[in-house]
Amino acid sequence: MAPVKISIIGAGSAVFSMRLVNDLCKTKGLAGSLVSLMDVDEQRLNGVHELASRYVRELGADLRFEKTTSLETCLHEADFVINTALVGGHAYLNKVRAIGEKHGYYRGIDAQELNMVTDYCTITNFNQLKFFVDVARLMEKICPNAWLLQTANPVFEGTNLISRCSNIKVVGFCHGHYGVIEMAEALGLDENKMDWQVAGFNHAIWLNRFIYDGRNGYELLEKWIQEGNLEKWRPKNPFDLQMSPAAIDMYRFYGIMPIGDTVRNSTWYYNKDFETKKKWYGEPWGGPDSEEGWKWYEQQLKTTTDAIDFLSKNRTLKLLSLNTYLKFLPKGAVPVEMKKEVEVFSSPDKLSGEQHIPFIDSLVNNNARRFVINVPNEGYIEGVPNGVFVEVPAIVDKDGWHVEKIEPKLTDKVLRFYLWPRMMRMEWALHAIMNGDKAALIEFLMRDPRTKTLEQAKAVIEEILNLPENQQMKTHYEKG
Ligand code: NAD
């Protein structure tokens, strides 16, 4: 057991901070550790710090928290750095998406074939990608031996960019592989009898191995389809896509199942407009990346941020009793998704399911466990160049990660028609940003089926570069 310093950048993140704090408090092997919470938004930072400090006291955990708005202070003597920051916030993403739509690009110019995820901006959020590199370079100076756990999106572009611009040890994290468990539940399978593997890139993973109780699991999926379950399928929320018509159609085309966010990352075939999205991702939202689906998600984020704010100001409320309080609220007052979070938080030992803290525990305390992580390819996926970050299953212990042999291999169609074009988009975005190549941005859009004229592509890029928050981006692309 060794105390470490864990630094969380963007600690006000509604999605992650309280999940990470939850897991830290319940991981005995990290007792005595110092957690540095860093954010530029002091109100959010104070709220999370107050809750974290109270939660530790209620649980009787042995952890110390510091809060800071200084990146340097946060990184000082850090052993692990978790970056969850979203530079510019959701407001910036909404602004840029609206500009894209004004110029004829439904859901904005970052929505591209095989990358439809709304907060996964590879082209327009220069400030976010630059921040990734700034953090890594500052780590080289302040905490060169620390690990960087890259969580903020875009994880695929981000991990590759960081590894090409710095020597910091970086590993990417996502929870998309839990789609395997969702699929098991839909098929009525006991997850403990499943032997599964996924492989690919972040938000681009495929179920290459699916054995159930010694038999081919894909036969069970076929049975589920033949019994008419696809026709009966309805989403419970916009993110409930694992068994959607889009997922099954992708399975039919590529030969194996897309897992988690991969289902969102399809082509224009399923995403052309709201009506098309509804057909493939289900009514009424058309998946999380439609106008209605994203509105739903932003409301969830707001509910979480408001809840953190409320709880931090009402200090007499016992955090471990939250589940009990909920029972007194009228039915439907709290979204189902939030109830699940509260249940974990109110329990003395339940973990959130995020991989970051167990990963640190495995490295520090040699508690070997299985993870699905983003690491540089070293022949793990044949046909993908070494060095490109792949999302693969690995055992992690004190010696680092040990990636499983990917067996059976991904299908040829997945490799050639999905991973290669997705990798090409990543290379393109990295080329543009690393060289300040504005022409590459415009050419990127010229290959977009929504672009009708060169003027259209140029105009949308110019309007985005001329936003006040994009001054640095503009200078960078004008000198390139
Ligand atoms: P959010 O806007 O709610 O939170 C981001 C936080 O970053 C805010 O508190 C903000 O103040 C802070 N921030 C902004 N600029 C900063 C800076 N320069 N330094 C420090 N902090 C800064 O966003 P969110 O919805 O919680 O998402 C955060 C990120 O996580 C996004 O990139 C999102 O795409 C990503 N994400 C990743 C996964 C995954 O599994 N990897 C899942 C969901 C979301």
Image (cartoon, rainbow, N blue to C red):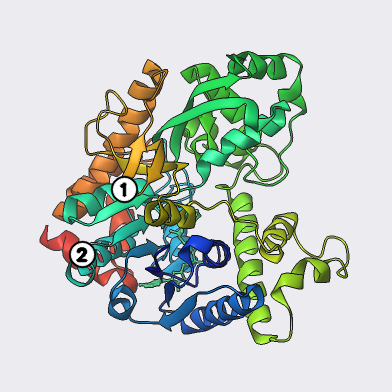
* Residue at point 64%, 72% (across, down): 59
Q: Residue 405 vs residue 264: left or right?
A: left
* Residue at point 28%, 76% (across, down): 76
Residue 290 position (above or below residue 377): below
Amino acid type at circle 1 is Glu
Under tag 2, what secondary structure? Answer: loop
Where's residue 13, x and y in %? 50, 67
Of 383 and 456, nearer the camera is: 383
* Mark 1 crowd level (few <14, some 14–19, many ≥20, 10 Å Cα): many
Where's residue 319, x and y in %? 70, 74
Residue 165 position (above or below residue 279): below
Mark 2 or 1, nearer chain start:
2
Answer whether residue 11 is visible to the viewer in this image: yes
Under tag 1, what secondary structure? Answer: helix
Q: Nearer the viewer, mark 2 or mark 1?
A: 2
Tag shown at residue 157: 1
Where's residue 52, x and y in %? 56, 76
Q: Residue 435 vs residue 268: left or right?
A: left
* Residue at point 22%, 39% (across, down): 387
Q: Residue 446 vs residue 373: left or right?
A: left
Amino acid type at circle 2 is Pro
The residue wearing badge 2 is: 144
Where's residue 56, x and y in %? 59, 75
Tell whether label 1 touches label 2 (CB within 8 Å).
Answer: no
Residue 1, by quadrant, is bottom left
Q: CA distance from mark 2 to mark 1?
A: 22 Å
* Residue at point 36%, 43% (across, down): 374
Answer whether residue 202 is visible to the viewer in this image: no
Q: Quadrant of ligand 1?
A: bottom left
